[in-house]
Amino acid sequence: MAQSIEHAYEFVKQRGVEHISLVGLRMGATLAATLAETLELEALLCWVPVVEGRRYIREMLALQKTGENAGLDVDSSSLEGGGFLITRETMNEITSISLGQINPQKAKHVRLFNGPDMPVPNELIERWSSTLKNFQHTSLPGYADMMSLPHHSRVPLDAIQQITDCLLNISVEKKEISRTPFLALEHHQETRFDCYTYGSSAKESMDAGGGFPVAETICRFSNETLFGIFSQPLLRDGERKPTILLLNAGSVHRIGPNRNYIYITRQLLSMGFRVMRMDFLGLGDSVHPNPAKENDPYLPEALENIRDAIQYLKDTFGVQEIIPMGLCSGAYASFQTALHLDDDSIQEIIPVNPLTFHWREGMSLDASPAEYYMDWGAYRQSMWKKDRWKQLLRGEKNIKHILKTLPMVLELKIIAIFKPLVNRLRRLMGARDVEDLALDLELISKKGVAIRFFISESDPGYQLLIEGAGKTVKKLMEKKVVEVSFIPKANHNFSSHLGRSRLLAQVGQYFSSRYR
């Protein structure tokens, strides 16, 4: 597991850097500590490390049973907690880890940072205090807020500053380092390697064995404020096919929730398509000049970012046809792109599990109609499961939330009957920024842009589509302008291995039949 860190260490070492420090969070901190037994380090900084691997695996098992994968088909050969796929072999490696048995003696300075809301690893502190010459332990703020839901998470600026100060305060012998090796890294903006698609089993999907050659290029555009990764197959004629532009899902950076965008990209690369995974301003590596605007999933500047990305793809890679595609808020962004951007290169969009088609500043991310519909769908499925009734009777289910959800869904259904007509009248009377899904779909259709939806069976996307513009949707589906594919036994973020496999299978079938 630590091999990637060793490669990075050697890469920097070979370029003349003598003083190297490792900084890690949770499992990254634990891996860094294990390497500090053999690698010469100036400093080792561990932030809330995993102290006992066996306990960590138990936590992941509990998360698998109670988290968003609960009730879904789960690959029995692996562990899937919080969307992380851990094979049996990796589980065995993790369970063997115990930081108390590790002595990071090769690090000249060791710092252990704890979170105020986390248990203090007293035994580890006592052991490292007695065996290491330069060891300190302190608490850092911001861990809980950082680990919250992506759209609620906050960058722990105070903690980052303290970590930075810690590194700066370590006295190191000053030595002039040649800038030449680092300036030469400018030529490392592209890498070539053998790629592989997502396997039919967890073990296959984690094996990085032989595959097909691809090239990936680091992209900086829009005055270098925006970041993206452009991937292209080397043995296929990708120039003749559309390029897929993957748009951020929620506040997750360009890999997507549960690495879904990585897997979608590899699937498309294997079929000869080129793919750009971009970060909107304030997400991932596209740093917003105003830290307060970080992590905004419905960014006001998103359309401008997409326009810049499309122009960059045309100018740099000669792209002629582009398909915006995205999950969740990325689905919304793709829809708004088709609606508002007049660009002949956009002939099709692919929204995946949209939660809204209309957004304005100040709308709630936690009390939206989609959230109530998702909860209602989950309750309907639970009605036929004996164990869920037992959980309800034992008080393990939130009865207050259930009682709140039912009338809200009823209210939303009543509103949905009259809302399209009311909003159409408001638009005709000159009101702006009014939701009218039927009209929006018609406008997109008149541009000649096709819409292909991929929606999980348990997700509310199709319900929102029908309730917002039922007649128009059915008319456009008859004309094949709008198409919908349903993914069975998959949740909103495709957090289970089998759910991801079903999504990728349908995406692959669609692209292979449409673009032969």
Image (cartoon, rainbow, N blue to C red):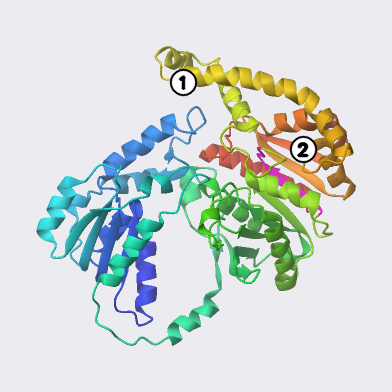
Residue 164 visible at all: yes
Q: Give the left or right position of residue 241, taking residue 211 as reference.
A: right
1 or 2: tag closer to the N-terminus: 1
Q: Where is residue 291 in the image (x, y as percent from the top left)?
A: 51, 58
Residue drawn at x 45%, y 44% is 85
Q: In this view, does 380 lie above or below 508?
A: above
Q: Where is residue 165 in the image (x, y as percent from the top left)?
A: 31, 66
For residue 435, the mark is 2
38 drawn magenta:
no
Tag 1 secondary structure: loop
Residue 2 picture quarter: bottom left
Quarter of the image containing the C terminus?
bottom right
- Using the numbered discs, state the Cα–Cα distance from disc 1 to disc 2 in whole angstroms: 33 Å
Residue drawn at x 63%, y 21% is 408
Amino acid identity at mark 2: Glu
Q: Is residue 19 above or below residue 362?
A: below
The residue that mark 1 highlights is 398
Residue drawn at x 52%, y 60% is 210
Q: Give the range drawn in magenta.
A: 347-355
